[in-house]
Amino acid sequence: MPRRDTSISKAMSHALRHEPGAYGLELGSDGSVPLADLADALAQSGVEATVADLRRVVAESDKQRFAVEGDRIRAQYGHSTDERIVKPSIVPQPVLWHATSPAAAESILRDGLLPMGRQYAHLTTDRDLAMQAGRRKSPAPVLLRVDAARAHQEGVEFSEGHDRVTLALLVPARYISADDSRS
């Protein structure tokens, strides 16, 4: 991604995930705002971005952080705002993954997976994506396997982040194990 697009993407994340009020934005219940409002808000904060720039950044991003629907844009996951973003419930893939530091893994295996500073805990259907995310926490992350089929069957609610990210308010420890396989 070109440096300018990276700057735009980071500003979009800040505005749509963490501090919409700092940009004069009010998120809808689904976390969306009009594209034109976001472009104006970013410009006022010193980040020049047209609606076409925003659409391009969304279309060319491999991480699928954002979604554009009509004339509105939203972050798909990663929110830390006080107002909970409404996410529709889904039936998750049978196995989900989460990777983190050894210390955090120990806590998760004892207490369950919690959102921490975000609105939802993030899991993925992709082991490699989990490890990539885990490396942001530790050079040697622990890969955790979540028995999402059993958890869902027993009442744990899951929501869609996007096609490779699944969200949950809480995954109790009994559904989580350290993955020992090497692949």
Image: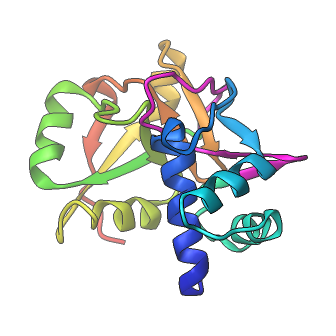
Which of the pair 34/135 is nearer the observer?
34
Is residue 78 something one can see in this rendering? no
Magenta part mainly helix, strand or loop? Answer: loop
Question: With respect to residue 138, does 25 lie above or below?
Answer: above
Which of the pair 1/150 is nearer the observer?
1
> Residue sitting at 55 percent across and 27 percent down?
158
The image quadrant of residue 34 is top right
> Residue sitting at 26 percent across and 40 percent down?
177
Q: Which residues are magenta?
A: 67-92
Residue 175 percent coordinates (x, y): 34, 29
What quarter of the picture does the N terminus occupy? bottom right
Is residue 86 something one can see in this rendering? yes
- Horizontal relation, residue 26 to residue 129: left or right: right
- In the picture as drawn, the residue positioned furthest to the right comes out as 70
- In the picture as drawn, the residue positioned furthest to the bottom comes out as 2
Residue 5 percent coordinates (x, y): 61, 77
> Residue sitting at 24 percent across and 53 percent down?
100
Q: Tell me which colouring the rendered structure shows.
A: rainbow
> Residue sitting at 14 percent across and 29 percent down?
110
The image quadrant of residue 28 is top right
Query: Does the magenta run of residues contain 137?
Result: no
What quarter of the picture does the C terminus occupy? bottom left
Question: With respect to residue 137, does 158 lie above or below?
Answer: above
Residue 134 percent coordinates (x, y): 30, 60
Which of the pair 80/153 is nearer the observer?
80
- Horizontal relation, residue 177 to residue 2: left or right: left
Residue 111 percent coordinates (x, y): 18, 25
- Horizontal relation, residue 91 to residue 139: left or right: right
